[in-house]
Image (cartoon, rainbow, N blue to C red):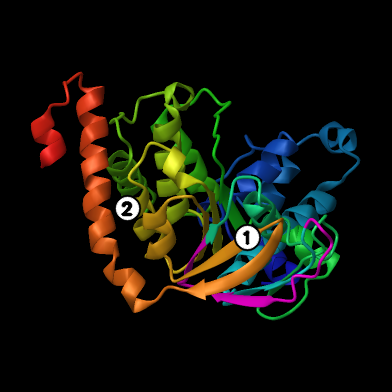
Amino acid sequence: MTVEEFMSLINSTSLEEVLKEYPIAVDFLANLRLDRVSQKVTLPEALEEIQDEMFEEFGMDRYGVMLGFCEFLQNFTKSETALSSVLNLTIIGGYNKSREPENITLTLSTGEIISIVGPTGAGKSRLLSDIECLAQGDTPTGRHIRVNGKELDDEQRFEMDGKLVAQLSQNMNFVMDLTVREFLEMHAQSRLTLNTGEVITRCFQAANELAGEKFSEDTKVTQLSGGQSRALMIADTAFMSDSPIILIDEIENAGIDRRQAIELLAKREKIILVSTHDPLLALSADKRIVIKNGGIARLIETSETERQSLASLEKLDNTLRNLRNRLREGEKITKDFLDE
């Protein structure tokens, strides 16, 4: 919708109905301390009840507030539309640590899972960072990131900054003293999530399935363990985030069911890149990017032979998981277990 169309909407529709359709607009009003105006009338009518001194404090008049409100809604919905149209991501090679050209162009499509493998310190996290900031030759690697085959100008790049890409890092710490339920409700409202109650329930259940230790909706997010925090954010990303590109840094260190986490995200038709040392995760991906000396060395498509080897890897992984669980429960490991 254009600004003019939004202006027509707020002139003919009660503020209550507008906020029901666009909950994010509450933030705009709150910033101007107008979040307590009457919502039973239109925004222009509600503003008539406000004294002039309040508008002067922010250097605005009533029309300026209405115009800003409409521009806010237009920019928000424009960004959401842009996100839904992302079909592929292209990485144009730059240089490795020795300033040797990568000489590679990779195009990744929605629905694909790509693992990133290489020694510790090789540059896996740097590649994720380049994608996260939509690099345009302005990072140490000199890489360029294109969306749908097109370069992003500065306006597009920073307009979608933080919306195009969702990153799940190794370390996650919450600073807000909210319960899990309150956190999910707040995010659902900010993302204009439909069927909020149902989505929150699904998100909470998925997080508990991923986490090694269960937690309740009343648990404070600041009290969650590292694994529980990662499980919550993965479920949140799967069910609430509109970001079409998901970056995950070493999920094997999260203390969660990592394969289930990847499968959950893959069902949402996103481009998923996972930096990992885990053979099971690396071979579960559609493709894997090999990083050496800070540069992209190869792109390998997972072969049928490699896929067939996953059954053996999963059996070994299950054995190790059972061993970890027994140790956590204080059990002793006998020769019989090792011979199973």
Q: Name the side, left or right, on which 234 lies relative to 264.
A: right
Q: Name the residue nearer the viewer: 31 or 183.
A: 183
Q: Is residue 165 above or below residue 209?
A: below
Q: Name the residue nearer the viewer: 295 or 226.
A: 295
Task: State the mark number for residue 135.
Answer: none
- Determine the image quadrant of residue 232: top left
Give percent across and percent down for residue 1: 66, 72
How many marks do you count on the picture?
A: 2
Name the front one of labels 1 and 2.
Answer: 1
- Residue 193 painted magenta: no
Q: Name the side, left or right, on which 241 lies relative to 147.
A: left
Give percent across and percent down for residue 60: 88, 44
Residue positioned 65% across, 79% down in the render: 148
The secondary element bearing badge 1 is classed as: strand
Res 63 visible = yes
Residue located beneath label 1 in the image? 291
**Amino acid type of the residue that numbered disc 1 sits on in the rendered structure:** Ile
